[in-house]
Image: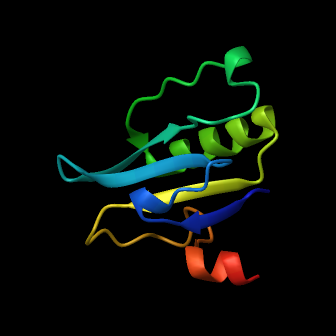
Amino acid sequence: MPEFIQCRPDQIPSQAVVVHAWHAMGRVVADVACSNCPRAEDYVIADFPRPVPLAIARAVEVCQICGLETIAVVVEEGLEWRRDWAPLKRQAEALSA
């Protein structure tokens, strides 16, 4: 299972799948991106907002396909991340481990 770290948008690691989570129309949604994945030319990643559990499952799939070990999670300010979506480390914790 990949490691999930919470990042600010300007601190996303280059070798990570990215999940952005935000409020939209009374729901929490997320999308998945991977701008710097190895083998990106073999695997086009175009994603649209979806429920967070589905976005997390998609991010894990992309990690496996691209051979990455980190999912960077960018959470909208004021959004409460639910631990049952995925265990989330703060970036400082992940870097010191």
Residue in view at x 26 percent, y 72 percent: 78
Of the 4 image quadrants, the one containing the N terminus is bottom right
Quadrant housing residue 94:
bottom right
> Horizontal and vertical percent for residue 82?
47, 70
Is residue 90 visible in this depiction of the protein? no
Compared across the picture, whether 20 is left or right of 59 comes to: left
Q: How many marks?
A: 0
Residue in view at x 52 percent, y 37 percent: 33
Of the 4 image quadrants, the one containing the C terminus is bottom right
Residue in view at x 68 percent, y 76 percent: 95
> Horizontal and vertical percent for residue 87?
62, 71
> Horizontal and vertical percent for residue 26?
19, 53
Instruction: Please say if 58 is above or below 2.
Output: above
Say which of 1 and 51 sits in front: 1
Q: How is the image coloured?
A: rainbow
Say which of 38 and 23 sits in front: 38
Residue farthest to the left?
25
> Horizontal and vertical percent for residue 71?
63, 54
Is residue 34 visible in this depiction of the protein? yes
Instruction: Please say if 87 is above or below 12.
Output: below
Compared across the picture, whether 55 is left or right of 61 comes to: left
